[in-house]
Amino acid sequence: MKNGFFDGSMPRGVLEYYLSHAATAQWIYLSDTLEDDIRVILKTGIKFLGRASGIWKAEMPDEKHFALSKAAADRIHEADPEIILQACIFEAVYREDLESTKIPAFVFEAFGLPFEDRCFDYDRCVLTHGSYIPDISDVETQMWFYYRAKNYIDCGYEAFHMGQIHLYTARDRDLRCIAKVLSMMREYAKTHARRHKIIIDAHSHSLVLGGVSLLDYNAMPFTRYPVLDREGEKLVLVREGKSGGGISQEGVYEKALPFLYEYDNWGGKDRWAHEHLTYEQRAWAQWWGYDQITWFACQDEKSRNEFLDYSFRWTAVNNPDGFFAFPLRRPCESGEEVGNYPFYKLNNKSDVCPDGYSQEDITEKLLKEGYEKYREFANPSMLDYGGKDIDDPETGVRLPEKIVLYGSFQPYVGAVENDSNSEITRMYYIGDGKFSLSFVMPYAGEYDFGISTWGTLSACVCESGGYPYSGSGGKSKLIIENDNTVVRITFTYMTNEINIEMMS
């Protein structure tokens, strides 16, 4: 039996199999290099194609859209029937789309309403007048969501990304309306989906009603911290929040659901930021004045390869429930700014894919290598640091609740340099009087570090077994020999023992 087999249900292990082989393949149903895309998918072992279909605004008539979506799904499943394709239902609706789409009879029937010969009513769907954000508390919006989901399921799509779900549930504070729609989607899938099951995510850390997660897994874009002392527009990733738990759609209680990170897109290059902000100001304007994928596409090939490797390791170390969706295909706003093409493509540049950015080889390497060796260094899945009201069993001494790594290395893991009170580099209590923190250092070099107890500079340690000191000087060296080195530092409070482990 293959790792990706499922029919009617999907245990967590199967879900994680797909998420651990995930890529964003936005609008692949429109790809002009589909055959080469499929070659890359098969070569790398990608099994989950995120954002493979969906609409944003008035792109084409729905009849054509769904026909093209089905044709692409059929071709991809012909190449590998195990693959899951994801469709999108976003947090935006537009008059051009709704008022040109007739409501099919099956929609009225599903909602127990008499048939009406009419199109969708845009004014009923939006949250406020003049807004493009839908209002899921209105039945008209529920009908629009269900209509789209039913058609994608019929086209062979087995996953749904529901966009910024907290925006369009603003009037649905008890989540009853969105729960109803998602339940209707799942019920339809039980009979009509390829494998009688769909999986659903949204940009959310948690969406739980009555103890049950409405989503199969949570998903968010990365969060960044700019690096100003390196040549070019460099940045590092920062963990933000955690994946919430609850009873899964399989009926199993999970402390933390799986989590999927991605490079998001929302507008390409911010020309105003580039024209009006200083270098230092622009560092904090989104991703150096770009959306995420456009920033990534604007790096040179070597830097793109290194950042993919870094993102993969960072995900494995910083969130043991997390996975990284490689950017197989993602839109950039303007071809003028990124080569002559509007899409970033993972494909190696060739005669059949002249607009490729050539990251398929590093992706193949990382996906075949897998997450597990880096998971050995992973921080705890929960952001509860522990160490509260715990006494050393031998002496009865109360252990600190807060212990922080600080020093010159901190900006490269997303913290302020020499911040002895940082939450970003706070160590986790792991038992037996020990505190630990793992992180990925993106650049080789010589750094320093100290350990502050209780998050202050009044009692710091820098030498294993040494005496505490007060002040900001006298820190220990941290020698990083290779880029993207995984580091774990463990500290035993009662003996001041410090242990440093590294994995290149």
Image (spheres, grey):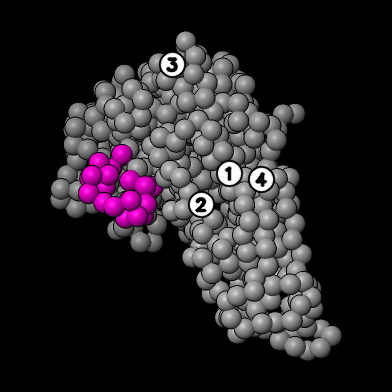
CA separation in Å, label 1 and label 4: 12 Å
Q: What residue occupies the far bottom of the structure in this picture?
A: 396
Q: What's the amino acid at mark 3?
A: Pro
Which sits earlier in the primary sequence, circle 4 or circle 2? 2
Q: Residue at x 75, y 28 (%)?
A: 1
CA separation in Å, label 2 and label 1: 9 Å
Q: What's the amino acid at mark 1?
A: Tyr
Which sits earlier in the primary sequence, circle 3 or circle 1? 1
Q: What residue occupies the far right of the structure in this picture?
A: 394
Closest to the camera, between mark 4 and mark 2, is: 4
Is the Cβ of the residue at disc 3 closer than 8 Å to that at disc 1?
Answer: no
Q: Which residues are magenta?
A: 269-289
Mark 2 lies on residue: 237
CA separation in Å, label 3 and label 2: 30 Å
Mark 3 lies on residue: 354
Label at residue 482: 4
Query: Where's residue 55, x and y in %?
Result: 32, 32
CA separation in Å, label 3 and label 1: 26 Å
The relative height of residue 405 versus residue 397 in the rendered view (above or below) is: above
Is the Cβ of the residue at disc 2 closer than 8 Å to that at disc 1?
Answer: yes
Q: Residue at x 35, y 43 (%)?
A: 290
Between residues 223 and 499, which one lies in front from this camera angle? 499
Query: Where's residue 321, x and y in %?
Result: 62, 51
Dot 2 crowding, Cα within 10 Å, few <14, some 14–19, many 20+ = many
